[in-house]
Image (cartoon, helix red, strand yellow):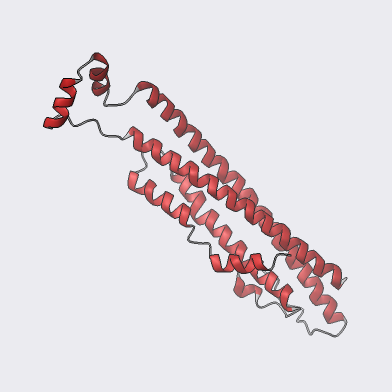
Amino acid sequence: MEIEAKEKIFHTFSEFMIRITKFDELAEVGSRLLVGFQHGIAYLRRQPIEKNTELVERVIKDNESKRLSSYIEAGCLNAHDSVHNMSKLHTCHLGLQDHVNKAKYAVDELARLLEDAEAALQSINCSLAQTGELNVDNDTDSLKTSQGEASSVAPVEHEITDIAILMAAVYSMVKSDYTMQQEKIVSSLNLASPSEELESYSSMWSLRPYIDDEIMHKAWKLVR
């Protein structure tokens, strides 16, 4: 029973890290969609040509045509480009909303796998306690979603404990990355979003401040 529980933790951990890879891929796609949305908004807000400078006046005069005049009168926006840009904006916005749904599903899957690991770890603890190898407090709290809580679980084999702790820590980071950043950014997007705000959103999305690369590196080193 104990061996089966240990193997289950290793298998669950592998599945967990596969889901992490999928979540990272989703984040990269979301980042590109957000940049596309940002560029689309920037195009709509592009300033018309300043005709009051001597150089611009000369260029316009030397190349005066009905096409150029119409372009300038339209605020230097090509009708075809404007339609294409609006379509791109719409596609990026829908894509980001779809990203939120897929990312939520990925986070929910991670939570389920973490619960499976908790159950397997408790099974090992109980098995060791029954054989007299481990003195377990019956009121020991199960592993939750933070490294501090995970470390309170009664000690078993070192590698198993490390995996449990890292799963909890990684899940906590990924959940924060989704709920505290990605979900909030997407829900706030609209055509009136300030350009400076969109620039900050794009930078923060790429930076992913809730993800600790050192912890992620440790987790990947334990994958069999």
Q: Is residue 47 left or right of residue 157?
A: left
Residue placed at 51% from the left, 62% from the top?
Answer: 210
Query: Is 107 above or below relative to 142?
Result: above
Which residue is rendered at x = 36% and y = 39% of the image?
A: 192
In this view, the residue in front, 214 or 109, is 214
**Residue 203 in picture, x, y percent from top left:** 42, 52
Q: Position of residue 201 (x, y in %)?
A: 42, 50
Is residue 76 visible to us here? yes
In which quarter of the view is residue 131 placed? bottom right
Report the residue that reaches farthest toward the left.
54
Foreground residue among 29 and 61? 61
Residue ID at (68%, 73%): 162
Q: Which residue is at 39% across, 39% downward?
A: 39
Q: Is residue 145 visible?
A: no
* In this rendering, position of residue 23 left or right of residue 31: right
20 is higher (above) or lower (below) than 142: above
Residue 179: image location, x then y, percent: 53, 54
